[in-house]
Image: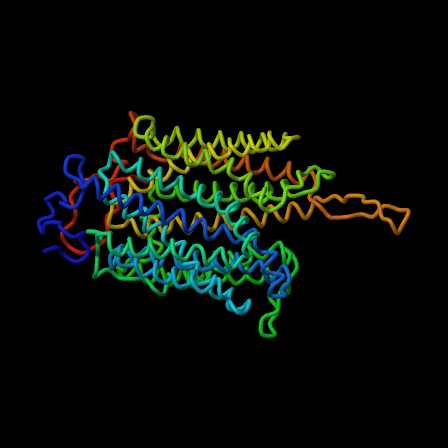
Amino acid sequence: MSSPGEPAGTSPSGTAPDPHVKKTEDFDRSYAIGIMLLMAALVMIVMYIEGMLTPSLPQIQSEFGVDYSQVSLVLSMYLVTGVALSPIVGKLGDVYGKKRVLGAVLVVYLAAVSVTGFSPTFTFMVASRAVQGVGLTIFPLAMSLVREEFPRDMVPRAQGILSGMFGAGFAVSLPLGAWVSNTWGWRFTYHSAIPIVAILVVLAIVFLRESPYRRPNAYVDYAGAGLLAVSLANFVLGLSQGPVWGWYNFAGASWHGIVWGAPEFFLLGTALLVPTALVEYYLHTRGKEVILDVRLLSMRNVMAVNLIITIAGFGMFLGFQALTFRLEEPVAVGGFALDTFHIGLSFIAFAVPMLIFAPLTAVLVTRVGTKPLTLLGGIIAAGGFFLATRTPTLTELLVSMFVMGVGLAIMNSAVINLLVLTVEPRDMGLATSMNGTFRNLGSSMGAPLAGSIMSTYVTYMQVKSPYSPKPLLVGPFPDSTAFLYIFLIAAAVMIFAGALALFAREILGKRAEKGALASDEQETPAVPGPLRYGAEGK
């Protein structure tokens, strides 16, 4: 019988290999492939549902009679909840079992998706969207479950497929969501997604097996997780609403007579970090497993992946925001005057390479290694953003978007292996959830910064008026300088993110470093005590 704190199946002597670790010759191939495809479908449908609503914001604003500041909460509240819940759900997956926690998350997500399309008021819709943010916690649990079912040499391929679904699901959601919304209204975008989500939820509950890596007696740091969640939520909300409320102006919005703006949220988020650190230190000194475990975060590969994902997510959403406005702007001010549907259709140029190059990278990474491919992906993505600065025609801009998709697919597919093959399976839920938190933070910062730059560098268009001999000024529109700066920043960010991989320890390929990979047969301590996170050095 296993001791508390051990993965199930570890012998009391601590000398026997873990029998739950999959090996190439004896793993259940059909089940592993099935779980990989199911998790990929879940990732894609979640990304689709969250992206499909973006083209519908003008309809929602008009129907409920709210202003731009209010309607933007439909997007930001989802992200706030996702960032807040990610570290908690990941830890619960390690303690109670990843299938059990994933099942509960999926049921809540299905309920939120089902009611959002029937929202009678705007307040109800924002609240349901906040609950829907639990969908972001599906990603780390899915990655953990896939990691546990494949032998080490096949993990990169499985993770590559999952990585490809992130960008592909989001990019496909824009044209398809715009078409559904324009044809049947924004509510039907939700109604049409309910059956698909329901089928996937049933399949996950019935088909999945419980993870063998559980620690039912482990301490759950609810206090630290709660404080961290509220702190992060304030940063995300301030960043999401910054372009609307203003980055420097206090008193951006009123809530029950108390006036709040982006600076207030930043200050509150920063202030909450102090009690968070004190609580974590107090619990750590008493031998408790804290949500911000220094040993896990200080592992070289774990820290490298978190930084890379944060920076790459920042650059990607920085570019996405600018691309959307560039495609929408009138031709007279340097845009392409596309409607909502054709803007979404243009992002297929980004989605296609994600579907092709993510699985291809997963095959190559076992031979080439994670570090060279992560760096290569960053350079290619940077090249795509640089090409976007020199695109006088729509065709050339679509080509640059294709190059961006290639680079990001290679980078995401390669770098995730640094995490899932370094951390021991029993700590995978917490590690991947932390990674999801970093990813969401980076993504939340990109779009607001793009909006700030585009509101700083503007131009106006002259239009002839039948009522006045003088032309009218229409605008403001972001000018070419704004797009130039945004795409150059995104290019520099991608190169920097790719270069950070050079500071990690290689785990695959001919140059894999000894001790960098969490061994599939390493011994596990038989007595409770400080957890061991593999042999990966600092």
Instruction: Locate residue 341: give its quadrant.
Output: top right
Quarter containing the N terminus: bottom left
In the foreground, 385 or 26? 26
Quarter containing the C terminus: top left
Image vertical order of residue 262 relative to residue 346, above or below: below
What residue appears at the point 44 percent right and 45 percent down from the top-left corner? 169
Q: How is the image coloured?
A: rainbow
Furthest toward the front, the residue is: 183
Q: Position of residue 78 (x, y in %)?
A: 48, 58
What residue appears at the point 34 percent right and 33 percent down from the top-left corner? 362
In the foreground, 292 or 92? 92
Q: How many marks do you count on the picture? A: 0
In the foreground, 172 or 403? 172
What residue appears at the point 52 percent right and 32 percent down from the top-left corner? 382
Q: Position of residue 284 (x, y in %)?
A: 31, 59
Furthest toward the right, the residue is: 469
Q: Position of residue 423 (x, y in %)?
A: 28, 44
What residue appears at the point 35 percent right and 39 percent down from the top-left corner? 161
Q: Position of residue 527 (x, y in %)?
A: 15, 54
89 left or right of 246 in image:
left
